[in-house]
Image (spheres, rainbow, N blue to C red):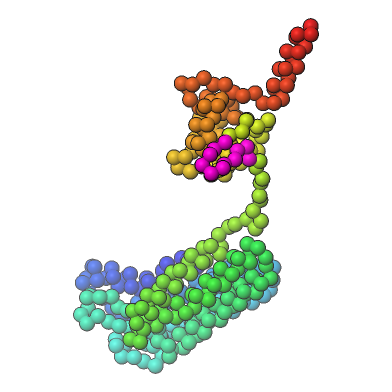
Amino acid sequence: MLLFCFLVYSGSIIDFITILLTNENINNQFGIVGVLNWGLIWPGAVFFVYFNSEILIPEKKKIKRIVVSSAIITVFLIEVFMFLGGLTNSANVMQPNDAFIFIYPENSGDDLIDANLNFTSPATIIAVSFGFVVMGYCEIGYLYKSIKSKGVVRKKFLLLSLAIILYIPGLTIDGLIYFEEVSIFTSIYGKITVLGCSLLWYFGLREEAAEPKKVRIPKETKVEGELFRLYERPSQVTEEEVSISKEKKICLVCKGKVLGYNVFICPSCEAFYCQTCVRALEDKENACWVCNFAFNESKPSKPQMIEAERIEIEKGEDLGKRS
């Protein structure tokens, strides 16, 4: 779908290259600029219908085949009428069945040939009708899906529906830009609206966990105002805590987010610390909680024993004294 969209201005690109090479516009006797600019949109619309049908009715294969087949037949008719309508164009003289309205520069090569749809031609009537039907199908479908869904899935469908709702008037304004009635403000509004829909599509389709897993990490520190208080080394630093610290980029001690210059990564075990906790640990024991790596080599390292080790040592000392 995007490939066909990128080819929308093929006619104008060829006209531009022709001007660079010959200083004159392309010979547009058969409406080639209009056929290439507008004719490549509709094959992309078939993929658009297929793509949205996969989202809206993924399990209903028969209905999907009917919808996509109808789109293919309609697009085939559009292309036939558009091609024949392009062939009937004769310079600046409009014919009833002309598919396009061409605006030529006063002097050949001074500007590009502008090709707009002729809203009285069969090609345009079918194309515009098809476009509104497809957009309505997606808009109503997304709204229905959002009502039936919950949580993040509901939000996704609402974003997609909003994108369609904004896209239709924006695209209509952008398509009518060659009329004198359309002001510069309206033209800019139409283009911004169309471009803004890309963001809504992106956030609507971006992968996101339906129910983010919340892992509760016990805090070993507390902050009161600007006073930082560090508790003793916990009785056990689990592998899960270390993994979460690395994955989420949070300090192993205070569990706060570490960013930019505030981060310290242990050279030995790659555990994450914030600079505040590292400075506090330097004065306290000067050792990593995971691997006992010395934070500051110029200071003595005195890893604090955890409670279980202390009890075992005390028991050993008591037995030694009794013996």
Q: Is residue 227 magenta?
A: yes
Q: Is residue 316 left or right of residue 53?
A: right
Outermost residue on the right side: it is 322
In the rendered image, residue 112, in percent from the top left (x then y), is placed at 28, 75
* Nearer to the camera, 284 or 218: 284
Residue 126, image x, y percentages: 50, 85
Q: Position of residue 65 (x, y in %)?
A: 64, 73
Residue drawn at (49%, 71%), measured in percent from left and top? 44
Q: The C terminus lies in which quarter of the figure?
A: top right
> Is residue 267 visible in this depiction of the protein?
yes
| Image vertical order of residue 17 relative to residue 266, above or below | below
Residue at 50% from the left image edge and 36% from the top image edge: 276
State the image quarter where residue 160 is shown.
Answer: bottom right
- Mainly helix, strand or loop, the magenta region? strand
Name the residue furthest top.
323
Can you give x and y, in whole percent of width and height, for residue 11 in the image? 35, 73
Along the line of sight, the residue nearer the viewer: 323 or 163: 323
217 and 118: which one is in front?
Answer: 217
Q: Which residue is at a point 49% across and 83% down the rendered structure image?
A: 128
Q: Which residues are magenta?
A: 219-229
Residue 306 in the image: above or below residue 33: above
Residue 245 showing in the rendered view: no
Quarter of the figure with residue 255: top right
Q: Is 323 contained in the magenta span?
A: no
Q: Residue at x 25, y 75 (%)?
A: 111
Residue 68 located left or right of residue 96: right
- Using the rendered view, name the quadrant where residue 292 is placed: top right
Please give the count of numbered marks on the rendered protein. 0
Along the line of sight, which residue is nearer the eye, 266 or 3? 266
